[in-house]
Amino acid sequence: MARPPAACEHRHVHYHGYFWRGSDEERSRKARDTHIDGPQFTTADVPPVKMCWWLRKPADKVAGTWGEPEGAAEWMAAQYEKVRTEIDGPDAFWAPAGGRYAAALRDLADGRDVTWQYQLGGDERAFVSVVACSPNGWDREAPCPVEGRGQAC
Ligand SMILES: [Zn+2]
């Protein structure tokens, strides 16, 4: 059952997750579109220069939406698990276990955006980002990308 529209009027902070992996070559080729003024900014899937600009992209870029920071931080840890065996570097440093997970949870609870970036083999990189929404502290005018689509209320 869909909730009645009135439930959406009382907006509160929630979180959107974004995942991207690709080569450094692709990122440099699309460098102009990592900026909000880039010609293909809204359709480009490469991570924007500012994390909060993810909110300025369409809803199809959203990999998940959560009302609580715990769910968002757990999703980040799950994304890490997807690329864990490919990470080029000391595992203990990048692992979300313990301090890294706790720090992400704390930052998200405080309304700060969090990105984990992984260098993978073969010139590839993965970006795992969770962005606070409604409002975002760095881009208070940003509209919720999924509002009106029945996901965010
Ligand atoms: Zn939102």
Image (spheres, rainbow, N blue to C red):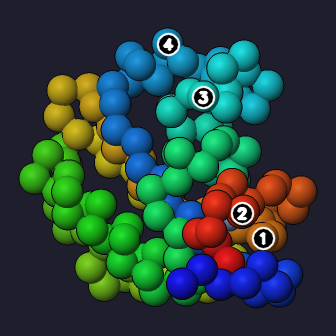
User: Disc 3 on helix, strand or loop?
Assistant: loop
Observer-side mark, 3 or 2, equals 2
Which quadrant, please, contains the N terminus?
Answer: bottom right
Q: Which residue is mark 3?
A: 43
- State left or right for residue 143 relative to residue 149: right
Q: Which of the 4 quarters of the picture holds residue 120? A: top left
Three-letter amino acid code of the residue under disc 2:
Glu
Residue at screen point 80% across, 56% down: 143
Q: Residues within 10 Å of mark 1 (few under 14, many from 20)?
A: many
Three-letter amino acid code of the residue under disc 4:
Arg
Residue at screen point 85% across, 81% down: 9
Q: Which residue is mark 2?
A: 147
Q: Earlier in the sequence, mark 2 or mark 1?
A: 1
x and y, in percent, of residue 133 in the image: 71, 67
Q: Which of the 4 quarters of the picture holds residue 44? A: top right
Q: Residues within 10 Å of mark 2 (few under 14, many from 20)?
A: few
Ligand 1 contact, mark 2 (Cβ < 8 Å):
yes
Which residue is nearer to you in this view: 6 or 48? 6
In contact (CB < 8 Å): disc 2 and disc 1: yes
Mark carried by residue 29: 4
**Up-down relation of residue 47 to residue 73 (above or below):** above
Give the Cα separation between the discs numbered 1 and 4. 32 Å
